Amino acid sequence: MVYTEKKIENELRKRGYKITPQRRTIVNTVMRSREHLTPAEIYERIRQEHPGIGLVTIYRTLEILAGLGLICEMHAGGNCRSYLMRRPSEHHHHLICSDCGTVIDFTDCDLGELERRLSKKTSFKINGHLLEFVGQCRKCREKTMAG
Amino acid sequence: MVYTEKKIENELRKRGYKITPQRRTIVNTVMRSREHLTPAEIYERIRQEHPGIGLVTIYRTLEILAGLGLICEMHAGGNCRSYLMRRPSEHHHHLICSDCGTVIDFTDCDLGELERRLSKKTSFKINGHLLEFVGQCRKCREKTMAG
DNA sequence: CTACTAAATGAAAATCGTTTTCAGTTAGCA
DNA sequence: TGCTAACTGAAAACGATTTTCATTTAGTAG
Ligand SMILES: [Mn+2]
Ligand SMILES: [Mn+2]
Ligand SMILES: [Zn+2]
Ligand SMILES: [Zn+2]
């Protein structure tokens, strides 16, 4: 299931959130992007069409969208900056190049068995998981070899 | 292989780092602890014996130790704070309670197959992975029920 | 042991991402 | 058309981390 902007607006309305021009732009920007965007990046993109928008509003809207599960957050290992991405239709994870930051999505993680085992052993109710592989993409590896 | 303080000192010396009383205390503090400590927590613990130590020094030392792989960093999902922990002898991961922050270590992750598949498909050289489960521990679940 | 020097330290300021505060504006509804 | 709760943006506050810089010190060479 792919989210259309209409669907997202309905989702927001349903929860009592208002549809403002700012929110529309933010949703639109995040939806259009194939890459993971930081709040600052979203801000920069929007500012060109819609100067005067506040970075705070970006934060507030992203928080709501993430809360509703309409977008998802990514925490890149090293520098601890949190990126935001549009949510593909399925559950997914990331393979990140530690040199250039390239992010590749993948969907097969198959952690159900492990989750069940852990849950049983620890009496935790497990709600989710974070899985990231870190490595070097081909380009960066070649660069390293050359250098 | 468990790191002794002597071994760590040697490792540092080998790389040209000096062994200062501050570094000794930091290594000692991190080694003694069974829990994951934030830089601030380490600072607080050390301050009692060794007032006058600077938080900066904690940061700088932790950075070196992490760089050498002698300790490892943890990035707790939500608030993006990075915790530091002593490195157990084996590769391990975390199960975190989103309510109270309790962290449980586990060692079985069995991601080798997936790693090989991804590596082949993407031409990445994969160097590591980050796996965290997030949920609610028993106590917090009971509290929720009661409330 | 003494002198030297690169490395390390700590105080203070700077930076960075994020959150709070608050006064003014607006979406959605009666 | 008017009301009001929700929303907005500027500014300030915030907390974690980093940088700067003057002073001190570990390790070493004499
Ligand atoms: Mn993704
Ligand atoms: Mn651990
Ligand atoms: Zn790369
Ligand atoms: Zn808990």
Image (spheres, coloured by chain):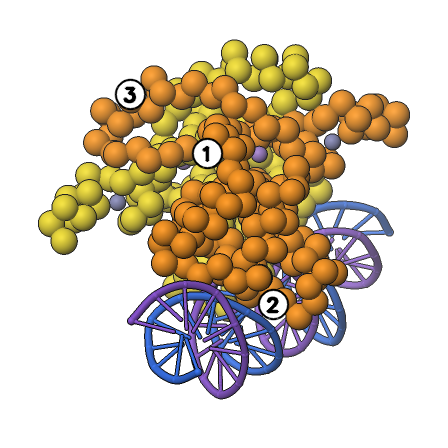
Chain colours: A orange, B yellow, C purple, D blue
> Which label number is shown at residue A54?
2
**Secondary structure found at label 2:** loop
Q: Chain of mark 3?
A: A
Mark 1 Cα shell of 10 Å, populated few (<14), some (14-19), many (≥20): some
Tag 2: amino acid: Gly
Q: Is residue A134 above or below residue A79?
A: above
Residue lying at 66% horizontally and 42% vertically, measured from the top left: A33
Helix, strand, or loop for circle 3?
helix
**Dot 2 falls on which chain?**
A
Question: Residue at the location (64% across, 53% down)?
Answer: A42
Q: Say whether disc 2 or disc 3 marks the residue closer to the N-terminus.
A: 2
Q: Is residue B51 above or below residue B72?
A: below
- Name the mark on residue B140: none
Mark 1 — on which chain does it sit? Answer: A
Q: Is residue B142 left or right of residue A75?
A: left
Does the beta carbon at disc 3 come under 8 Å from ligand 2? no
Residue nearest the observer in this picture, D7 or A107? D7
* Quarter of the displayed picture in which ligand 4 can be seen: top left
Mark 3 / mark 1, whichever is N-terminal: 3
Residue at left 21%, top 46%? B140
Q: Which residue is mark 3?
A: A117
Q: Label 3 is placed on what type of residue?
A: Arg
Earlier in the chain: of badge 1 and badge 2, it is 2
- Report the front residue among A25 and B113: A25
